[in-house]
Image (cartoon, rainbow, N blue to C red):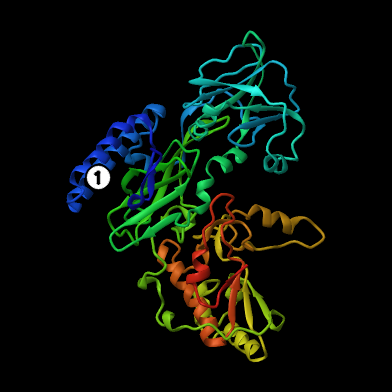
């Protein structure tokens, strides 16, 4: 029968044995009442929900630790170990694609097996038999050449045994990748000769290739719905923690639904949640640690709270995020050639942090650029009059290091000939207000230390837009930045600010 698409819910249903009866009921129900479209739709929705609930129950049986209460959203620590692993984290074998595994520098003697455990309990000690596995796959030594694209990608690997999965087992790889996996070389009596975890980038790329067409990862806000989409193909379960404010306790925790073809998890809530906040809970196996529950922000966040603790729910098309005059801004006329560009590179904080003509609360911030009579802005105006065409901003995406509240500027002392200056810098590095910004944490969100209120997810968006408007309207120069698109290996999403920030902005 293949797969059934549930486009309105942003995911797909697995055609698994436990779904067959309900799927048959859906088809027969449609055939009986197809002339009454309203009732047909209602019955299909009800049966689809029943199937989804069945899938959740089946997943619970495979991953018994999956249930998460709302208290998990409010824990002080971001990580909880649900099941501790009994094996170290070393991973010497490489899973090339769904069909082949290579173990560099390993001879083909003995027999090879792949053991798995949903709770990361496998123990494979040399000289003993494997114990505490949920199951095992037997692998065949493959003496021929692997497919050419695979050989090219992994040409850097040292020679070693290549192992092949049986075709029925290769069909199970998407589920196996969500569990602890231990590759074992055994003798004829089943005693372990060697064991290792696997490096899985290659097989993840192969099995979840459908994710490359995804274009709506992150949060999508509509008039009456909010959709969350996250690519987490190896997760056992993912939840959305939603918060009414940036600092209060969670209002709800809800499980997401997984598309087995892409590894993308989806949750659709029937409300416009603009202005609220969220985090994800992910249950996932970590080699050498076990099954852990991580509470994380969204890698596709468009804004966050202070120090990137929570992601902000927003559509960049929301009129509330547009400064006055935003829609009337037009880009400067394009130059005939790039060689005509005259570029000024600028660091947002450095531009105004020591400028006494800027309001104290705006120094080092996006808002400093709105004070058009400051020394810095008058200097830019003079440069524009002399031929300046473009301003290149150093990174303005969310930094990993700068504290967005209560950072400090260390007082440097000592001479250049001793180590005192460097010692002061190192001692204060974690608290320093300054950073070049080449340590991105969230590629698609503005840096919060440049906002006057980093706790409010809307502020950094509107103030960044006001800054760009100040350049274009006052100085008639184009603005571009090292604010780059997230370089994902599997899923690419356009940087929202590259198309929403200003008609003039260019990302590099």
* In the rendered image, the vertical position of residue 292 relative to residue 339, given as above or below: above
Res. 76 in view: no
Q: Is residue 55 left or right of residue 444?
A: left
Q: Quadrant of the C terminus?
A: bottom right
Total marks shown come to 1
Which image quarter: residue 318? Answer: bottom left
- The residue sitting at the bottom extreme is 385
In the rendering, at what x and y percent does residue 321 appear? 39, 71
Q: Looking at the image, which residue is at 18% across and 53% down?
A: 38
In the rendering, at what x and y percent does residue 136 appear? 53, 20
Q: Is residue 278 left or right of residue 357?
A: left
Q: Secondary structure at mark 1?
A: helix
Comparing 503 with 168, the one in front is 168
Comparing 135 with 502, the one in front is 135
In the rendering, at what x and y percent does residue 257 appear? 37, 42
What residue is shown with label 1?
44
Q: Is residue 125 left or right of residue 366?
A: right
Q: Looking at the image, which residue is at 25% across and 36% down?
A: 25
Q: Looking at the image, which residue is at 45% across and 49% down?
A: 230
Comparing 405 with 105, the one in front is 105
* In the rendered image, the vertical position of residue 347 relative to residue 62, given as above or below: below
């Amino acid at each position: 029968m293949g797969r059934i698409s549930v486009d309105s819910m942003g995911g797909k249903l697995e055609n698994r044995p436990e779904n067959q009866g309900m799927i048959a009921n859906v088809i027969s129900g449609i055939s009986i009442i197809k002339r009454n479209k309203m009732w047909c739709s209602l019955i299909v929705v009800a049966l689809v929900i029943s199937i989804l609930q069945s899938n959740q129950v089946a997943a619970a049986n495979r991953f018994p630790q999956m249930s998460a209460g709302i208290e998990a959203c409010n824990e002080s620590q971001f990580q909880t170990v649900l099941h501790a692993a009994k094996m170290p984290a070393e991973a010497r074998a490489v899973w090339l694609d769904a069909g082949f595994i290579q173990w560099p520098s390993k001879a083909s003697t003995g027999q090879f097996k792949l053991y798995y455990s949903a709770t990361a309990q496998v123990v494979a000690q040399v000289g003993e038999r494997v114990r505490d596995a949920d199951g095992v796959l037997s692998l065949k030594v493959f003496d021929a050449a692997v497919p050419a694209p695979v050989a090219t990608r992994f040409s850097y690997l040292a020679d070693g045994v290549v192992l092949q999965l049986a075709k029925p087992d290769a069909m199970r790889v998407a589920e196996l990748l969500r569990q602890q996996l231990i590759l074992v070389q055994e003798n004829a009596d089943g005693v372990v000769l060697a064991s290792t975890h696997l490096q899985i980038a290659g097989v993840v790329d192969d099995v979840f290739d459908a994710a490359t067409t995804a274009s709506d990862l992150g949060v999508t806000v509509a008039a009456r719905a909010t959709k969350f989409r996250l690519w987490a193909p190896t997760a056992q379960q993912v939840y959305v923690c939603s918060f009414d404010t940036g600092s209060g306790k969670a209002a709800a925790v809800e499980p997401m639904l997984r598309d087995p073809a892409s590894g993308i998890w989806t949750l659709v809530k029937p409300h416009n949640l603009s202005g609220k906040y969220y985090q994800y809970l992910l249950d996932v196996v970590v080699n050498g640690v076990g099954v852990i529950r991580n509470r994380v922000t969204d890698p596709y966040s468009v804004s966050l709270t202070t120090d990137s603790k929570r992601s902000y729910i927003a559509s960049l098309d929301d009129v509330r995020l547009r400064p006055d005059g935003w829609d009337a801004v037009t880009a400067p006329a394009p130059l005939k050639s790039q060689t005509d560009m005259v570029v000024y590179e600028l660091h947002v904080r450095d531009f105004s942090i020591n400028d006494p003509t800027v309001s104290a609360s705006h120094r080092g911030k996006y808002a400093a650029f709105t004070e058009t009579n400051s020394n810095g802005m008058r200097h830019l105006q003079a440069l524009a009059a002399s031929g300046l065409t473009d301003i290149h901003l150093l990174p303005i995406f969310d930094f990993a290091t700068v504290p967005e509240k209560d950072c400090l500027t260390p007082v440097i002392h000592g001479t250049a000939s001793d180590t005192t200056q460097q010692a002061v810098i190192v001692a204060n590095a974690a608290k320093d207000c300054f950073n070049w910004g080449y340590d991105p944490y969230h590629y698609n969100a503005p840096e919060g230390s440049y906002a006057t209120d980093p706790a409010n997810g809307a502020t950094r968006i509107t103030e960044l837009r006001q800054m760009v408007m100040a350049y274009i309207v006052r100085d008639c120069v184009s603005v571009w930045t090292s604010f780059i698109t997230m370089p994902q290996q599997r899923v690419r999403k356009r940087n929202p600010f590259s198309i929403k920030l200003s008609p003039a902005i260019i990302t590099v």
